[in-house]
Amino acid sequence: MDIRDRVAQLRPIQFRYHKDIDPEQKLRAGFSAQQVAQVFPDAVIEQNGYLFINGDKLNGYIQQAKNS
């Protein structure tokens, strides 16, 4: 599967961070770390029991897909 197909598997979501991370709990758009981990496991890190997307790594994959 090429990089474009892998990126196309990602589905954007709307979400709010847990109040421990963002006390204002603003509505955001992006990708689920759990979903990203299935497609790009190296673009996700775990800290204190939470999964976080490594934006630099994921953006690199998205740029590769755009340029291919």
Image (spheres, rainbow, N blue to C red):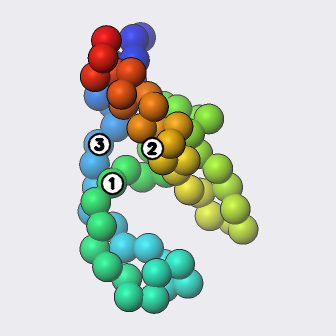
Viewer-proximal residue, 37 or 27?
27
- For residue 11, the mark is 3
Q: Which of marks 2 and 3 precedes in the sequence? A: 3
Per the rendering, the mark at residue 35 is 2
Dot 2 falls on a residue whose secondary structure is: helix
| Amino acid type, callout 2 | Gln
Is label 3 or label 1 in front?
1
Q: CA distance from mark 3 to mark 1?
A: 8 Å
Vertical position of residue 11 compared to residue 39: above or below: below
Kindly report the distance in space between the C-alpha atoms of the residues bearing marks 2 and 1: 11 Å
Label 3 element class: loop
Residue 25 placement (x, y as % from top left): 37, 82
Crowd around label 2: few <14 · some 14–19 · many ≥20 (10 Å)? some
Q: Is residue 10 above or below residue 45?
A: above
Q: Which residue is mark 1?
A: 30
- Residue type at mark 1 is Gly
Residue 55 visible from this viewpoint: yes
Spot occupied by residue 18 in the image (x, y as percentages of width and height):
48, 78
Q: Earlier in the sequence, mark 3 or mark 1?
A: 3
**Which residue is nearer to you in this view: 55 or 8?**
55
Mark 1: few, some, or many residues within 10 Å (few <14, many ≥20)? few
Mark 2 or 1: the one toward you: 1
- Left or right: 61, with 12 as reference point: right
Q: What is the number of the mark on residue 53?
A: none
Residues packed near mark 3 inside 10 Å, few (<14), some (14 to 19) or many (20 plus): few
Q: Quadrant of the N terminus?
A: top left
Q: Amino acid at mark 3?
A: Arg
Q: Residue at x 62, y 64 (%)?
A: 50
Q: Are marks 3 and 2 in contact (CB under 8 Å)?
A: yes
Residue 42's quadrant in the figure?
Answer: top right
The quadrant of the picture occupied by the C terminus is top left
Q: Nearer the viewer, residue 57 or 5?
A: 57
